[in-house]
Amino acid sequence: MPGVFDRTRKKALVRDISSNFNKALSTFFGEREPIVDIAKMQHKGYVDALQSCGVEVEILEELSGHPDCCFVEDTAIIFDDVAVICRPGHPSRVNEVHTISERLREDFEIKFLSPDAKMDGGDVVFTGNEFLIGRSTRTNDNGINELSEIASKYGYSTQVIDVPNSTLHLTTVCSVPRNGMLIVAEGHLKPEQISGFQDVIWIPNNETYASNTIALENGKILVSAGFPITKQKIEDAGFEPILVEMSEIMQADGSLTCCSLFIE
């Protein structure tokens, strides 16, 4: 995946917040409909934070009639010179992948999953030497098997993790601040599911949302604002947290990684 080996993520694709973002899917974090104008402001702040860390950001236009379209992470999995185009697990999101695949065709060899496969990119975490793939309501065994087969051809191993019904995606409850280390929210994944990791930062359950982070070079790491325990734990581990306000995006089950797709 671009930049994952040393966290020198250089370029990201993002998509503008939809004008009907208030109709986005929401099950886990949303207590109400998001306020679209504030979500747009927060999305701009997200882009600004990436750019402040040296990331070039390409902004794609919103997709009319697709309230979840800003969550581009779910549309593709990119590694080496390959872009695997996902088949989102919710019917309302299936058509989001078409414009993404056309854009990625400019830079990558495109591989498509079969019609029987379901996969959201939010169920895939790269740890530095392998892919963790979540089996969830959005990602099925066909999707897992097909991605695993593609990854193995490029020398990458995979580990399947059952995503509990307490969360949407694997990335909702864990992220990788540096190769071989995990940030994990308590009360979701079982310790035995991540027993291969000796270096784990456990985030308290009431700050689950903040376990989704974006690691960048020089120890900088984007962290959702408003979660002081997580911020302190990340600082104690030697990182520099860059706080990003995500409260309205959270209402639509969106997290930091959901809103970007790194292509360099």
Image (cartoon, rainbow, N blue to C red):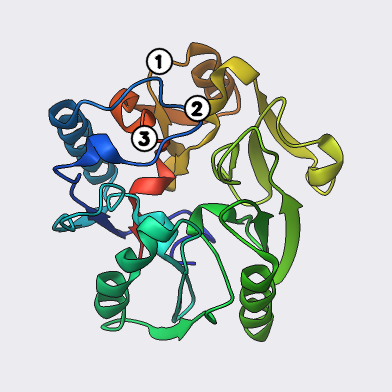
Foreground residue among 168 and 6: 168
Residue 78 placement (x, y as % from top left): 46, 70
Q: Where does label 2 land, which residue? A: 210
Label 3: few (<14), some or many (≥20) within 10 Å?
many
Q: Marks 3 and 1, Cα distance to the nearest angstrom?
A: 17 Å
User: What residue is rendered at 12% in x and 29% in y?
Assistant: 37
Quadrant (top left, top right, bottom left, bottom right) of the C terminus? bottom left
User: What residue is rendered at 61% in x and 74% in y?
Assistant: 147
Q: Which mark is residue 226?
A: 1
Relative to 190, say whether 160 is above or below.
below
Q: Marks 3 and 2, Cα distance to the nearest angstrom?
A: 15 Å
Residue 30 placement (x, y as % from top left): 41, 26
Name the side, left or right, on which 158 lies relative to 233.
right
Q: Earlier in the sequence, mark 2 or mark 1?
A: 2
Residue 49 visible here: no
Q: In front of the other: label 3 or label 2?
A: 3
Name the side, left or right, on which 120 lies relative to 129.
left
